[in-house]
Image (cartoon, rainbow, N blue to C red):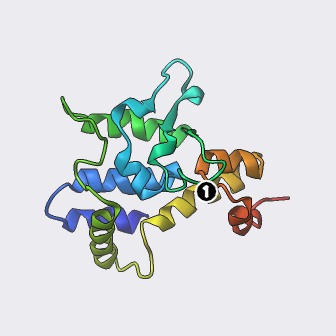
Amino acid sequence: LERLLTATDKMYVNKEELKCIILWQYYSCMRAGETLLMEWEHIHINEKEPEHSYIFVPKENQKTADKKGAEDRKVPLRPEFYHFVKDRVMKLKKNGQKFVFGHYWKTSTTLGSRFRVICKNAKVYNFKIHDLRHCAVSWYFVNTNLTDIEISKISGHIELSTLKRYATLRHS
C-alpha cells in the first residue's frame, strides 16, 4: 500500500485524488464503479457519534443491481476510514461538484489504466484496483465478529459462497 501511495507522486495530475481513491478502495469494500458513482451526499459523517458514520451505496449504482436480493447498502466507517474521510477526502470537495471521484475518472476502465501505471511505478505486479476491495473485505473477517451475512450487507456480495474464500481469515 505504501509503495502504491508513493508511486502516485510520479503521476502528472490528480496525485492527491489518486492517493485518496487508493485509500478509499482499501478501506471501503466498494467496487471501483460504485466509488466513481458516489456523490458527496452519500457520505454521512456523524462527528458526535463517529461509529454511526457511513457511506450510502444506492442499489442502482451497484454491479449487482439487477440481481435478486440486491438492495441499497451502508458501508460503515471504521475508525481509520472515518478519520481519512473527515480529514482528507472532505478537503477534495469543491463547489458545484456532485461526484466525489467520478469527475476525475469517468469509468472504472479509465481508473484501472491509471492504477496500472501506478502499479508499474511502484513495481507491484499482478495487482488490480479491485484487489484493494479484497483487502477491505478481509479486514472485516480478521478484525470483527460480524457474520458472513452482515459482511455481505456491507460489501454487496449477494452470493455468500463468494465470501467463503475469506472465512479462513477468522480466528475461530
Q: Quadrant of the N terminus?
A: bottom left
Instruction: Residue 116: give x, y in percent of width and height.
Output: 32, 74
Looking at the image, which residue is at 73% across and 59% down? 160
**Residue carrying label 1:** 137
Q: In this orientation, does residue 88 appear? A: no
Q: Residue 162, relative to residue 34: is it above or below?
A: below
Residue closest to the far top: 48
Residue closest to the far right: 172
Q: Quadrant of residue 76?
A: top right
Left or right: 108 as drawn, with respect to 50: left
Q: In this orientation, does residue 12 appear? A: yes
Q: Quadrant of residue 3?
A: bottom left
Q: Residue 117, relative to residue 170: is it above or below?
A: below
Looking at the image, which residue is at 52% across and 34% down? 54
In depth, the one of 58 and 35 nearer the eye is 58
Near mark 1 (Cα within 10 A), the count class, few <14, some 14-19 or many ≥20, is many
Looking at the image, which residue is at 29% across and 56% down? 18
